[in-house]
Image: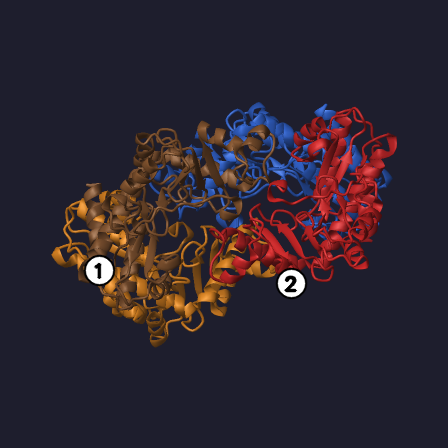
Chain colours: A blue, B red, C brown, D orange
Amino acid sequence: MAADLGIEVVTLAADWRRGVDYGALRAALADDAAHALKAVCAVHNETSTGVTLDLPRIRALLDETKHPALFLVDTISSLGSLDYRHDEWGIDAAVGGSQKGLMLPVGFGFTAVSEKGLAAHEKSTLPKHYFGWTTMLQRRHKSFIGTVPIALFYGLQESLRLIEEEGLDAIIARHARLAEAVRRCVRHWSGNNGPQLYCLSPERVSDSVTSILLPDGYDAEKLRRRVATMNVALGAGLARLNGKVFRIGHLGDLNEPMILGTLAATEIGLRLEGIPHAPGGVDAAMAYLAEMAA
Amino acid sequence: MAADLGIEVVTLAADWRRGVDYGALRAALADDAAHALKAVCAVHNETSTGVTLDLPRIRALLDETKHPALFLVDTISSLGSLDYRHDEWGIDAAVGGSQKGLMLPVGFGFTAVSEKGLAAHEKSTLPKHYFGWTTMLQRRHKSFIGTVPIALFYGLQESLRLIEEEGLDAIIARHARLAEAVRRCVRHWSGNNGPQLYCLSPERVSDSVTSILLPDGYDAEKLRRRVATMNVALGAGLARLNGKVFRIGHLGDLNEPMILGTLAATEIGLRLEGIPHAPGGVDAAMAYLAEMAA
Amino acid sequence: MAADLGIEVVTLAADWRRGVDYGALRAALADDAAHALKAVCAVHNETSTGVTLDLPRIRALLDETKHPALFLVDTISSLGSLDYRHDEWGIDAAVGGSQKGLMLPVGFGFTAVSEKGLAAHEKSTLPKHYFGWTTMLQRRHKSFIGTVPIALFYGLQESLRLIEEEGLDAIIARHARLAEAVRRCVRHWSGNNGPQLYCLSPERVSDSVTSILLPDGYDAEKLRRRVATMNVALGAGLARLNGKVFRIGHLGDLNEPMILGTLAATEIGLRLEGIPHAPGGVDAAMAYLAEMAA
Amino acid sequence: MAADLGIEVVTLAADWRRGVDYGALRAALADDAAHALKAVCAVHNETSTGVTLDLPRIRALLDETKHPALFLVDTISSLGSLDYRHDEWGIDAAVGGSQKGLMLPVGFGFTAVSEKGLAAHEKSTLPKHYFGWTTMLQRRHKSFIGTVPIALFYGLQESLRLIEEEGLDAIIARHARLAEAVRRCVRHWSGNNGPQLYCLSPERVSDSVTSILLPDGYDAEKLRRRVATMNVALGAGLARLNGKVFRIGHLGDLNEPMILGTLAATEIGLRLEGIPHAPGGVDAAMAYLAEMAA
């Protein structure tokens, strides 16, 4: 579709298990003296691999290279779970959704845009609808671009109330704590040539979802079906990771017994499917959580 | 209140951790040649201690001693969770509730009565209202003894649908399996002079609730408050067991990750409160559940 | 049951369509020099007839005759809809429920008691449970007389919030306004020997429910079934009024279109059932509501 | 946007109060010997004006003129309320939504496509996403074009159950009956130079929404605000009809008392706002509904 619209998309090659190389990104920006690159697009939290990007660092690369490209960010699986600072990090446009950290059903897409982003938008001739900010700002408080999903607004009111009640800092800390418990468990399992964290960069592991790579020759889909018999829905590996990877989502309305029950059912599943692993992963997670609570 | 109504209640002395002695009950019935005892009252599942009674055995004692006493049973915390056979076991009157195995809010009390029970009821001069079966049978399909709790009837329709879908036998087996997982965990914890099952009779342990006795000198209420910080609500010890005992309810809409998450949070709580226990209880529960699923 | 407990109930004879005669009540109190009467029991709003009692007037009769009887009141179908002042009116004990003016499902019964009521209670030897205030006050904040209906407490929190938001005075005025609209409609219908208000005392008509008497020879149950085909559930006549009377409840979460739709469906029902009436009742209700809103 | 994509949109001029002229449409098709027109786009039920189109007649015009244009239909405010026969009427592509006749929240858009429509789609080079049928058919039962709105699927299951329970024919008849009651009411009001039906073609009036034109010099928005104080949300006039027209939606989960209550509140509003009208519109609606039920 991009090609149909006359847009050329340049994808920076990256090892999926490590995410994009910041040096390569810097080089690409520095090499683009003609400023042919109009925007740098980044996924804050890649939901299929459990790899995050350091958005302030990308902002710094743009600044260092004095590159005027817009900085566009997908925050769908990070908004409300990971730290995100739209203005401070100089993001020009971001998209988010209702169904992850905001704990709502699918239905809302959110966008946020900077002054620079709005200025670019006004000159843009690409077809647009959900991103039709100029139109929407003219209609402000008057009408919508479609029938209003009223029920979701009531839901949003409640989820924002919950977020204010717990406090955004506390929420981000809770996500970090429960995610680290998951990683302690997986690292323990990996002992006997068992499953391992898909993400190989310790500073890029995601606090909202963990992707776990099975040892060669074992089928993640079989494991998922087994664990589903205990009412735990593990996430599937997406695209080329299907069958190799399973994922544990740990964002939104989540607490210690929920994540420990999930890990315990998964460890039972590993045992029943005969997948090599070092038993005791749940104990490792419990030990970490006890230490954090002490 | 019973005394006000001219009723004498004879309580068969029993060790709370073992439940009533069937021999003593047999003797009491055999000794009552004048049939002064009008009814034998039994609690199928004692919710405070986690001790069950063998109702068919009590029925057999009544039959063997040819005692005509009515057999009255409280099934509140067993109905829909443990095997209960009103007609087959010759129960004359039973009470149940909506809020346990039927997975509904508090609100419904159910009664079931035998022909013999109804006949006794017709001659009874005690004040009664919820047990006013004669009145109710006359009103059959016409009116109620109060305003009808319509919402609960819709809920009941749904919980009965869920029960039929899973199958009552499967539900009873599930309760037995999850309860045994809890007991394996507690027995493991008890290793280092840790918490132990309050019920000392292995054949009387309850599949709907487990009472757990802390070692002397430790406060069950402190443990409960600690575990509550992880969003797990352990049951309090009731009456004279308060502070000494905590309880894990495992009935109704419950599955493996829910009970394992509960046990894991409780084991973290034991650690944080410095209560002696052998770590690894959750592993013992997981091993049992894996074995059962294999 | 009262007789079983040694209580003698003296019922003051009354015309059901007018309610008790205050003069007769005064006489009964004045005649009881020995103070054999221990309590005066009154129903604030009689749900079967739509007749209310003037509680301050009854209080005045007790005061004038210097009679020490307790003053016990049923507020079930008035609480939250009609003006009720427990302390100011010197009520000694009152019962209320969740399912009427509080807009909740059936499930809660409320009691309120005066110091005098509590003192009488402490000396009382009657069997009691829901009225066991002495026991309950000892347990204060510790336990309940049964399993707590948690969902209803959340509901109560919300219904009290709604009541505070609208304001109790505004709620009482709304009930009076919508009830008068119903009465204007019924009085109009009564023109051609049609249905009439069951309550014949204009100062006693109820603002929470209106009982409507059909002309002789017409079956209120047939009318109710007809109107039910339009999804309107009229109330049945109770006990000896069954078939003669139908009732329109107008309390709780109710507004103009809801009550006007109800009246319109009922007027259609009258027409379809060939019950004599002056058409135009809904217009009379609308005219009144327009006048009130002007 | 259409122009950006190289599409020329030809709008057939029409009187908004009568809808498009079928003769003019026939002429346009007949004149297009070169088949430059690729598609005829029709709105089954125009939600702003309350004017419907006769889709079988448009199909017949295409057939008579042997014109190969695709026939594309918007059924958003008709699906599940008005008779719609995708295959029988030879529609090539249709869009519908969850939030009208299907009685669900906003969230689902439905599309239906003919073989001819699919064939055209495969050759189309326009950018597309929600209409990306080729992609979706390849993914069949495998994945979606986004995160699945699971809650809406449960809702759809229930609304389809309700539709089957009532029967689609009965639902269409109910919409016709309640809509005609609204029109009888409005025609009565129009007597004294009062509000009138916006749609002037009796055979095109909509059974899902009625647009009502106020007499000159009266503000429909003031009326809407007044009626809103009685908890009735009338629809606003859209675009150039704003302030002149108000709308009554009468589709989905609707019955006699709901629509009569709405009409009664609106008639009160007309009175309070001093808008000329012949009182008695609600009576006219009631008379019609009584006649239909007889």
- Picture disc at residue B115: 2
> Quarter of the image holding residue D185?
bottom left
- Residue A236 appearing in the image: no
- With A236 as the anchor, is C54 left or right in this view? left
Q: Please tell me how crowded label 2 is: few (under 14), some (14-19), or many (20+) other residues with Cα within 10 Å.
A: few
User: Residue A136 location, x and y as percent?
Assistant: 38, 40
> Taking B49 as reference, is B31 above or below it?
below
> For mark 1, what is the residue?
D283
Three-letter amino acid code at disc 1? Answer: Asp
User: Residue D76 location, x and y as percent?
Assistant: 40, 58
* In-front residue for pair C219/A245: C219
> Quarter of the image holding residue A212?
top right
Q: Please tell me how crowded label 1 is: few (under 14), some (14-19), or many (20+) other residues with Cα within 10 Å.
A: many
- Picture disc at residue C84: none
> Taking D111 as reference, is D222 above or below it?
above
Q: Which mark is nearer the camera, 1 or 2?
A: 2
Write down the chain letter for disc 1: D
- With D77 as the anchor, is A25 left or right in this view? right
Quarter occupied by the C terminus of chain D = bottom left
Residue at (64%, 51%) from the top-left corner?
B95
* In-front residue for pair B12/A32: B12
> Taking B132 as reference, is B225 above or below it?
above
User: Residue A7 location, x and y as percent?
Assistant: 52, 44
Write down the chain letter for disc 2: B
- Residue A172 appearing in the image: yes
Three-letter amino acid code at disc 2? Answer: Glu
The kind of secondary structure element at disc 2 is helix
Q: Share a chain, discs 1 and 2? A: no
